[in-house]
Amino acid sequence: METPFEKEPISGESKVKSASSAVAVDAIDRELEKRVVRKCDLHVLPVLSVVFMVAFLDRINIGNARIQGLEADLDMEGQQYNVALQVFFILYILFEVPSNIFIRKMAPSTWLSGIILGWGILTIGMGVTRSYAGLVVCRVGLGLFEAGFLPGCLYLMSVYYRRHELQRRFNIFYGTAILSGSFSGLFAYALANMAGVGGYNGWRWIFIIEGLGTVILAVITKFLIPDWPETASFLTLDERAFAVHRVHEDMAGSAMDDLDKKSRRRIFLDWKIWIGAIIYFGCANNGYGTAFFTPTILEQLGWTSIKAQVYSIPIYAVSTVVAVATAFLSDCLRHRYLFCMIGICVNSAGYIMLLAQHGLPVAVRYIAVYMVQAGGYITMPLTLVWLNNNLGGHYKKGIGAALQIGLGNLGGVVASNIYIPSQAPTFPLGFGTSLALEWLTAIGCTVFLVGLMRENRKRERGEREYRYNLPKAEQDHLGDDHPRFRFVY
């Protein structure tokens, strides 16, 4: 059986071809499958998870630096903090798609470790800058280098795991980013005590120490991040062939390994990708809003900045546990939509409590922040994997993930501008807008569900069989437009 990778020659391909002939097409060797999945869990998931935790830490540590004196030291006023947040997204959004095209053309270990090094250096730059302009320049550059990491990791993981193996593993990966919120608070609490060391205030050491750690991690990960399954050094030749085969079979043989004109049309005119971007836009606003402003919101409850840092730690820990547990259920039940809606409802209840916080005890408002965080982090990773599950072929998966995450991250731009300091502590614009966007996600998920069900019924009735009459070269690159492909929801 020909694998999709055989359409695109790569290093070690001939060996994988010869080994793949030994793989039984009509029966899966369960012991071999367990061994391959176990190796992937040991070599793919941990290193990507650690780096994503560091990436998100570097992205959101500005929220902790703010309450440690960032604005006063750089003479910031008015909306300048919000501007510093939103400039991150300029290049972050623009370079998502090019990055996922580049990663396919080179070793992921080289590409990903290179961009990690870049954002580590810029994080250090934020700690030593003497001006607001310097902070803005570093934030713009940080967006450029971080652009390719999340979509690249989702793309890389999707070629190692079957569709209903991916969600729980992606949520473990994504959960480390949630945990970075608690680490961020913990580090900020510790590093605040370094104020005065080297003549630097405590907020500067937050950036410098975390940036140095990222630079060191970049060097190490060059040798740890796995490359494509066909050349994975942790797998034997037979295991490589089997890893390719089982994912290919799970996708009903769909492939898209040439980025020609017809493939580009199938990618950029696919309604699923654009609906997926709208879905992620709604919940990404929540993710960034809580990451950037949770310390500030907790401080407005009447706590000192140090106490606010410490009290943010369990919020992220609980959110991580809830997100991972939900992912296991979603994979076991092979269902996505209902779990997305559960997350949206929990999140919405939290926002409603915060909007009606007058007269509510501090403890109740604190619980509301838990609900906002936990509900949001149930939904966000589910929406990314749900779209990925329904895209077929290498280029479509890669570009589709990049478009969804890139355009969806416009929600981060919104989040950067809706928490107005003059509206503290009630933040009606911030909480109200975030609540509305959560229900934009709910509407998008429902449209996505109905569209997938409708298309599956058409395929069951044979209404897509005409595609078998297309030229063989085009049939080989139909992706999820292949008549055998079935959508999951």
Image (cartoon, helix red, strand yellow):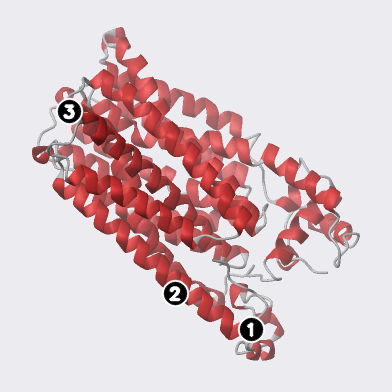
Where is mark 3, residue-wise? 71
Q: CA distance from mark 2 to mark 1?
A: 20 Å
Amino acid under label 3?
Glu
Q: Are marks 1 and 3 in contact (CB under 8 Å)?
A: no
Count all numbered tags in the image, as a single digit: 3
Q: Earlier in the sequence, mark 1 or mark 3?
A: 3
* Quarter of the view holding residue 112: top right
Residue 80 higher or lower than 89, as above or below: above
Tell me, for residue 10, which label it has, or none. none
Tell me, for residue 460, which label it has, or none. 1
Where is mark 2, residue-wise? 271
The x and y percentages for residue 302 are 17, 25
Q: Earlier in the sequence, mark 2 or mark 1?
A: 2
The x and y percentages for residue 205 are 33, 18
Task: State whether residue 376 appears in this view.
Answer: yes
Q: CA distance from mark 2 to mark 3?
A: 43 Å
* Quarter of the view holding residue 27: bottom right
Q: Looking at the rendering, in which quadrant would you find the N terminus?
A: bottom right
Amino acid under label 1?
Glu
Give the residue displayed 57% in from the left and 62% down from the top.
389
Task: State whether residue 118 appears in this view.
Answer: no
Labels 2, 1: front one: 1
461 relative to 421 in the view: left or right: right
Q: Callout 1: few (<14), some (14-19), or many (20+) C-alpha neighbours within 10 Å? A: few
